[in-house]
Image: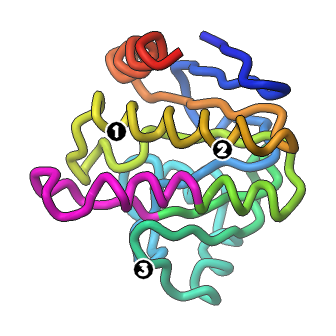
Amino acid sequence: MEVRINNSILALVEGDITREETDAIVNAANSRLAGGGGVDGAIHRAGGPSIMQECRKIGRCPTGQAVITTAGNLKAKYVIHTVGPVYQGGTKGEAALLKSAHLESLKLVSAKKLKSAAFPAISTGVYGYPVDEAAHIALTTIIDYLKEHADIELVRFVLFGLKTYEIFAAELKKII
């Protein structure tokens, strides 16, 4: 599914983010930048040890923030590591932190003058964020950013599993 936001394209696909050829892929990292399971583990496995070496030099990344490394063996040029919140019922500022994780990632895309980025469904795996709520926050944040920043040509959500894709697609239809 694709929609145009001014000069940019926002796309949703079901697939494996490690195969993306966008300028950057976004990693749902932990605050220690220590690798892990899910998207984080897949990116580190596919990208090789050079990504972890750069992460160790950076050290940490607070929840809601983002840092950037090269992409090792991946087809993308960069990996943007962002830390989404652990869902605790929605009353501990999780929505603002999830919005910030997306926004700070987009700011790095713009700062590096990149034209494309691929995002996973941040915080919806082991961090337990309800997919429909996360989709709404992610999509509205990115749409709002693209309306103000014509420098980014493509933002693609690469969603793992048909169910997650369908939830994001339904949410996008409500928003546009």
Question: Closer to the N terminus: mark 1 or mark 2?
Answer: 1
Q: Residue under circle 2?
A: 145
| Image depth: mark 2 or mark 3 in front | 2
> What residue is shown at x 62% (from left), y 71% (from top)?
67
Q: Residue under circle 3?
A: 32
Residue ranking furthest to the left = 89
For the record, the magenta segment spans: 83-103
Question: Closer to the N terminus: mark 2 or mark 3?
Answer: 3
Instruction: Please give left or right for residue 55 compared with residue 20 in the image.
Output: left
Above or below 51: residue 139:
above
Residue 9 falls inside the magenta stretch: no
Q: How far apart are labels 2 and 3 at the CA level?
A: 27 Å
Residue 33 at x, y percent in the picture? 48, 74
Residue 85 falls inside the magenta stretch: yes
> In this orientation, which residue lies closer to the viewer: 93 or 154?
93
> What residue is shown at x 25% (from left), y 62% (from top)?
93
Above or below 25: residue 6:
above
- Type of amino acid at the residue the image marks with label 2: Tyr
Please rate how many residues cluster around mark 3, counting C-alpha atoms within 10 Å: few if below 14, some from 14 to 19, many from 20. some
- Residue 155, picture quadrant: top right
Q: Residue under circle 1?
A: 134
> What residue is shown at x 56% (from left), y 30% (from top)?
158
Above or below 50: residue 126:
above
- Do tag 3 and tag 1 residues touch (Cβ < 8 Å)? no
- Do tag 1 and tag 2 residues touch (Cβ < 8 Å)? no
Circle 1 — which element? Answer: helix
- Type of amino acid at the residue the image marks with label 1: Ala
